[in-house]
């Protein structure tokens, strides 16, 4: 056993000596080798290698030099200094250089998965705040006037001033919000789905005027009587010596839309460069609703002067003498009823339109990215059916405070028995939309952007266009002609078509992963 172990040690020592180019003396088998006296090092280890043990002679050999590896490239570029494997030019050299024996090597281009710069995302979502402006509400005929007490607010009188109507109403600006969510469903990220939609707030334009207790100023609602359609007349709401009251003209508008689209990527540049671009087409379904309302509501509190009448009697000797007085409250008529001071008469006209679009949609979207900046443009066009609904409501309410009598009558002023009801109509409609965004990358996946959005609808019904100023006063409950049957009726032309647009700025964030 002892001799075997000693023999193994001698064999290892002989192999080590051969590695240094020096043969070591063989030790006799069976006898232990003499202990080697290794002198301690007295200086710095030479740059060419460690000191040899004492007793060994021969030239000092350098350790073998290991050359840096070379890239495997095409026959025209075996060093890998240019494009490798058809993946395009490398973006940058490796640093630090591998050593003095070779030229700098290059990194391979980034992979085409989501970790690469400019690569297509698996999914994306964006949220926008929108500051929008819309086409104004048409109200071309005056809805409320004032004048001197004797002119009764009739249009054309020198003192008459239009307080509401006779011009378009502006709702601007609208606040809105848009949400978009999409994803690619295949490994190559060529086919995907995207859902998007936005909604605006319900924006109103309100004119609210209240007279003094004595009826100042005069407030009146002008119209054209069917007996003489070219002659202006009015329904007096407040006037000194007649009544005090309040008139509210309110119009509002709100729009929202939703869409679901399939996404097909037509072109996408190779990721990894400083500038990348992509082009997608989208096709799917779009829903849009535009709801608008225009109403005029008035309240009249009578303050007609009372009439005092003396009471006479025949006294002694046949002499007629006054024995007292009687007071008769001032009154007027409404809906065939006598309304006495301080009775209240309220009149309401309300016109509402709802436009609902259902149709197909196609779109083209392009995005260009340079460094941390992006430019995005989307053009859409929807084609389909615009289902239009018109609701006209009108009524008159009466409160006789002296005896507690209450009642209602069918019809107001402009909304009366000749046009009150629910109506529907369908039109072929086209809705183009354009969105332009400029963004900056906050992180690799998160970007902030600002943009411009424009939406146009070629055919809609709007409440201001459905108001007919020609009225048969025989069907107006607050008119002195109420109930007259010998007055000409009025033909209504409903669903006057108009266009609508909505445009403005959008600010948001988009997350891609």
Image (cartoon, helix red, strand yellow):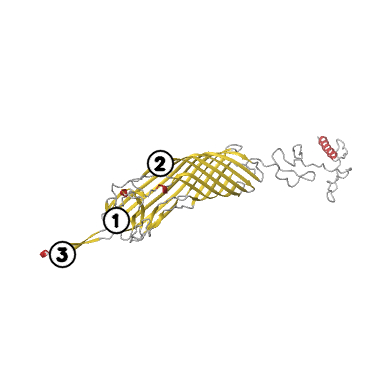
Closest to the camera, between mark 3 and mark 1, is: 3
- Residue 380 appears left or right of 481: right
Q: Quadrant of the N terminus?
A: top right
* Cα distance in 3D space between marks 2 and 3: 70 Å
- Residue 77 appears left or right of 46: left
Q: Earlier in the sequence, mark 2 or mark 3?
A: 3
Q: Looking at the image, which is closer to me, 141 or 363? A: 141
Which percent across, then down, holds residue 325? 20, 62
Which percent across, then down, holds residue 99? 78, 45
Residue farthest left in this picture: 317
Q: Earlier in the sequence, mark 2 or mark 1?
A: 1
Which percent across, then down, holds residue 506? 54, 50
Is there a contact, CB below 8 Å, between mark 3 and mark 1? no
**Number of numbered callouts drawn:** 3
* Cα distance in 3D space between marks 2 and 1: 38 Å
Q: Earlier in the sequence, mark 3 or mark 1?
A: 3
Q: Looking at the image, which is closer to me, 65 or 440? A: 440
Which percent across, then down, holds residue 505? 53, 50
Q: Looking at the image, which is closer to me, 110 or 380? A: 380
Residue that badge 3 annotates? 321
SS type, badge 1: loop
Residue that badge 1 annotates? 343
Residue 56: image quadrant is: top right
* Cα distance in 3D space between marks 3 and 1: 35 Å
Q: Quadrant of the C terminus?
A: top right
Residue 82: image quadrant is: top right
Residue that badge 2 annotates? 424
Q: Residues within 10 Å of mark 2 (few under 14, many from 20)?
A: some
């Amino acid at each position: 056993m002892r001799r075997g172990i000693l023999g193994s040690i001698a064999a290892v020592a002989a192999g080590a000596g051969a590695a240094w180019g020096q043969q070591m003396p063989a030790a006799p088998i069976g006898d232990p080798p003499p202990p080697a006296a290794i002198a301690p090092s007295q200086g710095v280890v030479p740059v060419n290698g460690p000191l040899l043990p004492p007793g060994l002679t021969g030239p000092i050999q350098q350790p073998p030099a290991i050359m840096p590896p070379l890239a495997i490239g095409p026959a025209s570029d075996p060093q890998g200094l240019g494009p490798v494997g058809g993946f395009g030019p490398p973006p940058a050299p490796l640093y630090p250089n591998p050593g003095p024996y070779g030229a700098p090597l290059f990194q391979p281009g980034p992979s085409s998965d989501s970790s690469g710069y400019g690569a297509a995302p698996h999914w994306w979502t964006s949220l926008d705040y929108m500051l929008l402006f819309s086409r104004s509400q048409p109200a071309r005929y005056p809805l409320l006037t004032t004048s001197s007490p004797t002119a009764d607010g009739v249009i054309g009188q020198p003192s008459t001033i239009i307080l509401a109507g006779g011009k378009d109403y502006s709702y601007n600006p609208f606040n809105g919000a848009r949400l978009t969510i999409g994803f690619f469903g295949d490994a190559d990220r060529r086919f995907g789905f995207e859902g998007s939609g936005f909604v605006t707030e319900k924006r109103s334009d309100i004119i609210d005027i209240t007279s003094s207790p004595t009826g100042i100023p005069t407030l009146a609602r002008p119209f054209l009587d069917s007996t003489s359609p070219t002659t202006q007349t009015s329904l007096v709401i407040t006037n000194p010596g007649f009544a005090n009251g309040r008139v509210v003209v309110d119009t509002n508008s709100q729009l929202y839309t939703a869409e679901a689209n399939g996404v097909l990527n037509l072109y996408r540049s190779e990721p990894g460069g400083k500038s990348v671009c992509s082009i997608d087409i989208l096709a799917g379904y779009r829903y849009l609703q535009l709801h608008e309302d225009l109403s005029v509501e008035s309240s009249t509190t009578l303050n007609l002067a009372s009439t005092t009448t003396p009471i006479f009697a025949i006294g002694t000797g046949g002499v007629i003498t006054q024995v007292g007085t009687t007071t008769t409250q001032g009154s007027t008529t409404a809906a065939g009823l006598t309304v006495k001071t301080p009775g209240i008469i309220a009149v309401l006209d309300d016109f509402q339109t709802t436009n609902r679009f259902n149709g197909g949609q196609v779109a083209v979207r392009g995005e260009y990215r340079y460094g941390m900046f992006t430019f995005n443009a989307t053009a859409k066009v929807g084609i389909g059916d615009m289902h239009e609904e018109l609701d006209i409501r009108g009524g008159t309410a009466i409160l006789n405070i002296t005896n507690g009598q209450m009642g209602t009558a069918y019809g107001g002023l402009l909304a009366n028995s000749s046009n009150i009801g629910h109506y529907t109509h369908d039109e072929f409609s086209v809705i183009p939309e354009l969105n332009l965004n400029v963004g900056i990358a906050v992180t690799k996946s998160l970007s902030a952007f600002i943009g411009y959005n424009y939406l146009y609808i070629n055919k809609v019904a709007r409440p201001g266009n459905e108001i007919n100023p020609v009225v048969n006063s025989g069907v107006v409950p607050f008119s002195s002609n109420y109930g007259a049957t010998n007055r000409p009726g009025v033909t209504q032309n409903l669903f006057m078509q108009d266009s609508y647009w909505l445009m403005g700025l959008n600010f948001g964030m988009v997350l891609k992963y």
